[in-house]
């Protein structure tokens, strides 16, 4: 559907949105269009090579890589807003979105990015998450920020498909939002344009509105990886884009392993003389399965055995070693630590190698976290602007604080031990250690730290007579 709509928009965009700045262009090259389709297929089914015709099972490595990065990026994220009742309101509206942020991050990691687009529903602010293959970029500014895009929404009523196109364009401090609705009896085209009021869900949406703001009223979360599919595209790339061919190799190797188990199953070549005849002219054995070969031996009964067992030695260890090596290559290409996909028992154990592997994962995760924080800042700005525009809550300032975690590099227990050594060496405050690592409140930690300091000073004051 994405590719059909893209082709239709490219042909009709000038007619539909001719007055909008940059309305005659969709910034999506053929390479990026194909890449998005490939990344989506890999995430959903494993890849175009995993079809019934090829009889190839998938390890679903692409989905695993995207899920692991989403987990590492968001597992310790805490966002707090303070400063006014407006900040409290924004925090309350943002909470449902943050609860599902790991899922949204996984989709963004798979498809190279996602758009967070807030909208007003009654007295609430909701966030629409548009996946990387569900919007059409039209303009970027000189810094690479997405400033214009077309978003689509579809509803189906009996035999009619309703499509709404929502175009956002930001230029010279003004956000222009245009909405158009269409009705069609098939997915082959958008059909005829209709009034927004014809669809109850869209009846309250204005056909066009212009808002004076400092930046766009949506946030583009771009995965900050170099885009090898189109070096000139400002769009993000999938976290597993560098390993597409290697993921294919892993599925091929997994298929060989499965065939080794399938072909190496125990079977019995049975002489027809060992079978009991049945009334319909067939043969019968007490123990049989689909792999039993019947009546395939010839010769005199006295000169041969009645059956031979087929039980070849499996070569699964060799296939598993090959698969594990491919998985390690995928981990390196995607920026994951060794042992994330591969067998952790086969990972080198020297301290230097372990730290280097963790640092590779840490570097990738930190860059994604930085991009996500920028997108959340843009999202909060847009939500605050809508709160002003619709007067949802009295005006006020807000301050956003993001708390990320680095436990992918430092194990929590190791990090705690490290900072205790800092306390003992006098390089880290005892009170802060107690609050961060032992769970004490500020008051309790201050009291314990004061008592400890007093005891230490008392010990230093002791003197002994000669």
Image (tube, grey):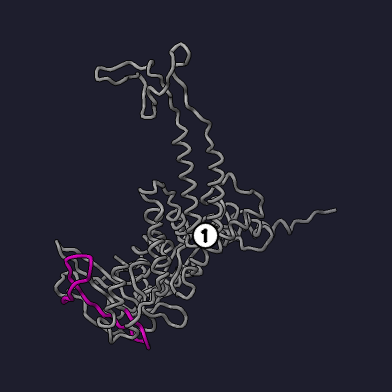
Q: Is residue 352 above or below residue 299?
A: below
Left or right of 309? Residue 273 is left
Badge 1: how crowded within 10 Å, few (<14), some, or many (20+)?
A: many
The foreground one among 85 and 250 is 250
Residue at far bottom of view: 172
The foreground one among 163 and 293 is 293
- Identify the image quadrant of the N terminus: bottom left
Residue 247 location (% of width, % of height):
48, 54
**Residue 106 in which image quadrant:** bottom left
Residue 296 location (% of width, % of height):
40, 24
Is residue 437 visible in the rendered structure shown here?
no
Q: Main secondary structure of the magenta part?
A: strand
The foreground one among 396 and 183 is 183
Residue at x-position 27% and y-position 75%:
166
Residue 463 location (% of width, % of height):
78, 56
Residue at far right of view: 466
Residue 363 location (% of width, % of height):
56, 64
Left or right of 192? Residue 267 is right
Q: Which residues are magenta?
A: 168-195
Q: Is residue 218 above or below residue 102?
A: below
Residue at x-position 45% and y-position 40%:
258
Q: Is residue 134 above or below residue 71?
A: below
- Residue at numbered disc 1: 334
Residue at x-position 52% and y-position 59%:
334
Q: Is residue 186 magenta?
A: yes
Q: Is residue 370 magenta?
A: no
The foreground one among 2 and 76 is 2
Residue at x-position 41% and y-position 21%:
270
Q: Is residue 338 above or below residue 202?
A: above
The secondary structure type at the circle numbered 1 is helix
């Amino acid at each position: 559907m994405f590719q059909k709509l893209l082709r239709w928009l490219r042909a009709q965009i000038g007619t539909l949105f001719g007055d909008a700045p940059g309305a005659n262009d969709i910034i999506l090259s053929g390479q990026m269009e194909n890449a998005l389709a490939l990344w989506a297929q890999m995430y959903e089914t494993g890849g175009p090579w995993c079809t019934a015709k090829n009889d190839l099972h998938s390890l679903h490595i692409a989905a695993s890589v995207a899920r692991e990065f989403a987990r590492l990026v968001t597992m310790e994220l805490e966002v707090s807003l303070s400063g006014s009742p407006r900040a409290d309101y924004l925090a309350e509206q943002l909470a449902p979105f943050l609860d599902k942020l790991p899922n949204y991050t996984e989709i963004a990691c798979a498809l190279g990015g996602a758009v967070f687009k807030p909208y007003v529903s009654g007295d609430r602010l909701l966030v629409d998450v548009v996946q990387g293959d569900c919007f059409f970029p039209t303009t970027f500014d000189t810094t690479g920020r997405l400033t214009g895009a077309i978003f689509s929404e579809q509803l189906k009523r009996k035999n009619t498909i309703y499509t709404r196109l929502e175009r956002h364009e930001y230029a010279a401090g003004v956000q222009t939002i245009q909405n158009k609705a269409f009705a069609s009896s098939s997915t082959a085209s958008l059909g005829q344009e209709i009034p927004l009021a014809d669809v109850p869900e869209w009846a309250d949406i204005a056909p066009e509105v212009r808002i004076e703001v400092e930046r766009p009223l949506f946030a583009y979360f771009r995965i900050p990886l170099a885009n090898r599919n189109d070096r000139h595209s400002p769009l993000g790339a999938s976290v597993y884009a560098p390993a597409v061919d290697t993921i294919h190799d892993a599925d091929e190797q997994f298929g060989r392993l499965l065939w080794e188990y399938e072909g190496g199953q125990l079977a019995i070549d049975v002489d027809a003389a060992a079978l009991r005849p049945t009334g319909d002219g067939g043969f019968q054995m007490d123990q049989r399965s689909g792999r039993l070969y019947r009546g395939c031996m010839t010769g005199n009964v006295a000169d041969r055995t009645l059956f031979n067992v087929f039980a070849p030695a499996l070569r699964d260890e060799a296939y598993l070693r090959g698969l594990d090596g491919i998985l390690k290559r995928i981990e390196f290409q995607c920026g994951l630590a060794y042992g994330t996909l591969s067998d952790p028992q086969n990972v080198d154990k020297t301290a230097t190698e372990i730290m280097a592997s963790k640092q590779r994962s840490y570097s990738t995760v930190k860059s994604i976290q930085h991009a996500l924080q920028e997108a959340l800042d843009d999202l909060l700005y847009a939500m605050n602007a809508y709160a002003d525009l619709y007067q949802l809550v009295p005006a006020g300032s807000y301050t956003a604080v993001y708390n990320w975690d680095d436990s992918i590099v430092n194990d929590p227990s190791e990090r705690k031990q490290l900072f205790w050594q800092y306390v003992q060496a006098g390089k880290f405050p005892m009170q802060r250690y107690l609050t961060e690592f032992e769970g004490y409140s500020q008051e309790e930690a201050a009291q314990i730290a004061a008592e400890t300091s007093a005891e230490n000073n008392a010990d230093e004051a002791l003197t002994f007579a000669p």
